[in-house]
């Protein structure tokens, strides 16, 4: 799942793949703004066939948080 998230961040949001690590913070470390975060959530919903609830968006702090959320949502 990490590789899929890394691929989305690198290809769709133009993040340097070398910077994408599980512990990297989306905003502070990768420089993602709120619009790009919304794009990432839409990409996750489309790619994995899930719905991210508005209440869950605050859980997306690190790359690892995204991976964990997707793993739990796709079980």
Image (cartoon, grey):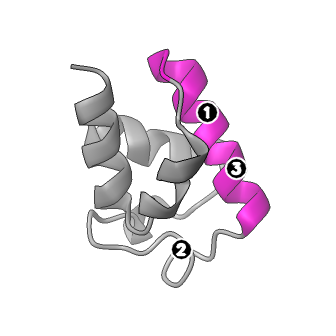
Instruction: Answer with left or right where residue 31 lies relative to residue 39.
Output: left
Residue drawn at x 71%, y 45% is 39
Residue 74 found in image quarter: top left
Residue drawn at x 53%, y 36% is 52
- Looking at the picture, how far across and down is residue 48, in whole percent? 45, 20
Of callouts 3 and 1, which one flags the residue occurring earlier in the amino acid sequence?
3
Looking at the image, is 8 positioned above or below residue 32?
above
Tell me the crowding category of disc 1: few under 14, some 14 to 19, or many 20 or more residues within 10 angstroms, Cα based.
some
Residue 71, numbered label: none
Rounded to the nearest angstrom, the CA distance separating label 3 from label 2 is 15 Å
Rounded to the nearest angstrom, the CA distance separating label 3 from label 1 is 9 Å
Q: Select label 3 or label 1 by which is in front.
A: 3
Residue 38, numbered label: 3
Nearer to me, 51 or 67: 51
Residue at which label 2 appears = 30
Residue 75 found in image quarter: top left
Range drawn in magenta: 34-50
Which secondary structure lies at badge 2? loop
Q: Residue furthest bottom?
A: 28
Residue 43, numbered label: 1
Find out whether the residues at labels 3 and 2 contact each other: C-beta distance under 8 Å: no
Tell me the crowding category of disc 3: few under 14, some 14 to 19, or many 20 or more residues within 10 angstroms, Cα based.
few
Find out whether the residues at labels 3 and 1 contact each other: C-beta distance under 8 Å: no
- Looking at the picture, how far across and down is residue 2, in whole percent? 28, 44
Residue drawn at x 48%, y 81% is 29
Of callouts 2 and 1, which one flags the residue occurring earlier in the amino acid sequence?
2
Which secondary structure lies at badge 3? helix
Q: Residue furthest right?
A: 35
């Amino acid at each position: 799942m990490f590789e899929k998230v890394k691929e989305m961040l690198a290809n769709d949001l133009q993040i340097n793949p070398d910077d994408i690590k599980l512990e990297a913070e989306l905003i502070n470390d990768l420089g993602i703004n709120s619009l790009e975060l919304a794009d990432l959530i839409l990409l996750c919903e489309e790619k994995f066939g899930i719905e991210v609830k508005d209440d869950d968006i605050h859980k997306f702090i690190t790359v690892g948080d995204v991976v964990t959320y997707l793993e739990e949502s796709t079980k």
